[in-house]
Image (cartoon, rainbow, N blue to C red):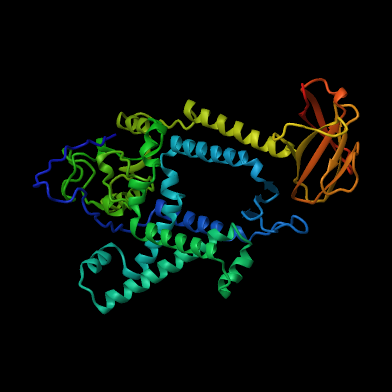
Amino acid sequence: MAKAVSKPQVYEGDGKGPLYADRVKIHPRNFNGPFRKWKTILLWIFLGLYHLFAWVRWDRGPGLPDQAVLFDLPGRRAYIFWVEIWPQEVYYLTGLLILAAVSLFAASAIAGRVWCGFACFQTVWTDLFMKVEHLIEGDRTKRIKLDQAPMSLNKLFKRLVKHAIWLAIALFMAVSFLWYFNDAPTLTKNLLTGNVGGWTLVVLIVLTSLTYIMAGFAREQVCFYMCPYGRFQSVMTDEESLLVTYEAWRGEPRMKGAKDIGTDKRGDCVDCGLCVQACPTGIDIRDGSQMECIGCGLCIDACNTMMETLNLPKNLISYDSYTNMVAREQGKGKQVHLIRPRTIYYAVILTVVASVLVASLSMRDRLEVNIIRDRAPLFVTLSDGNIRNGYTYKILNMESDDKTYELSVDGLNEVAMDVIGQDKKDQKTLTLHVPADRVGAFKLFLKAPRGKLEGPSTDIDFVLKDVETGEIHSQSTVFRGPK
């Protein structure tokens, strides 16, 4: 495999010029081929999923949203089909992020930057914007001529139409993003009637602007300078990873024109430059593997087009591993090893993390209790000699039904309980009501005779019983008293 060689840069200026070179606009040329076909298919699949998923309905019962995927920020929870995630369960988000990261690492170990080339949102949006540009301004040659031509009515009209469509697409992308944080039909109706709040409008403007700028103007610059993935991709690939490669052993030395085809002194590469013209990041894959390569394979389609024209074997540029390329050079059989220690490790990690998430979701308790004991003061000595402690007792009812609980205390004799808001005093057992999908917060006071305390600190248990099911939840704390 040809390797990229870092060439020394010689500066011959007077020290007064700009520190950074201006960006050279890239005009990718469109070639038909399997990689272009798959990029287009996946483009419409991903866009369809992104825009339509928010409209899928899911019946969760009365009083709950019926949107299958909804991140309800005002309600402080997330709904993903049958899974309901509360803020206290943010560790599930951590698990999903780990799954996403390891999946990306596994994909890189198998096929390099296949995610960047076919599924990254920057790639998808940029590809869509470029399709609009190609439709209005024409293919590469016409776009270059239009850029170089002086301003005219024809050029102005095409530019206005192109940017108007870009802005419309960017706006639609932003609206689709907001659908996942609001009820999609309601938000759409409010947007059409102009009934939107300040924050919704701010987010809409920001997302529209970012999509318009990133996909319409920044494009490959996002991959070069903003995305960190390309810079650490090399540590996730090895000699068995499938990457976009140029077979220098077959293509070099390059020939000029078709007259040298078949001679022993010339390779198959005719130096036509189609691979560079097709590249959306403007690199020459013949210089070896580079950080700027996003693995889209469009240069393969371009090169195969020329190889077919010259009746030469295809795949001078191909998605291949270094090991297999060397084996072909030596006349050996195919050497592709997708199952190897690196991919096995990733598969094991994915299996373990996914299993833990599924098991945790299936066995998680739909009741959560939190006890906060008053610290100022630690205790109060009442006029009758009893010692009183204060507690804030919170019950998180994650069920879709209202719940009634009975609360009692173990570990302390002759204890009496009061709860602010209830008329009954000095009770042995409290009855607490918590609405569905709500947090019930209760201010409790416990008092006990001083002589019944074991010392300055007595271990006690709050025992909460579900009246309907009989399930019991116990949580330990302490009762403070004088020394």
Which residue is drawn at the image coordinates 43% and 32% (left, top)? Answer: 336
**At x 69% / y 47%, what residue is drawn?**
83
Residue 453 image offset from top left, x and y in percent: 84, 23
Numbered circles on residues, count = 0
Q: Position of residue 285 (x, y in %)?
A: 28, 44
Which residue occupies 86% across, 48% down? Answer: 422
The answer, for residue 200, to whether it is visible in the render is yes
Q: Nearer the viewer, residue 361 or 322?
A: 361
Please state if 288 lies on the left or on the right of 345 as rendered.
Answer: left
**Above/below status of 83 relative to 345:** below
Q: Position of residue 73 (x, y in %)?
A: 61, 54
294 with respect to 188 (left or right):
left
Q: Nearer the viewer, residue 416 or 354?
A: 416
* Outermost residue, bottom side: 153
From where the camera sits, is residue 366 visible? Answer: no
Residue nearest the observer in this picture, 421 or 286: 421
Q: Quadrant of residue 64?
A: bottom right
Residue 361's place in the image compared with 126, above or below, is above
Left or right of residue 155, residue 363 in this image: right
- The front one of 132 and 339 is 132
Quadrant of residue 68 in the image?
Answer: bottom right
Q: Residue 50 sits in which quadrant?
A: bottom right
Q: Residue 252: x and y, percent?
A: 21, 39
Position of 445 relative to 344 (above/below): below
The quadrant in which the C terminus is found is top right
Residue found farthest to the front: 383
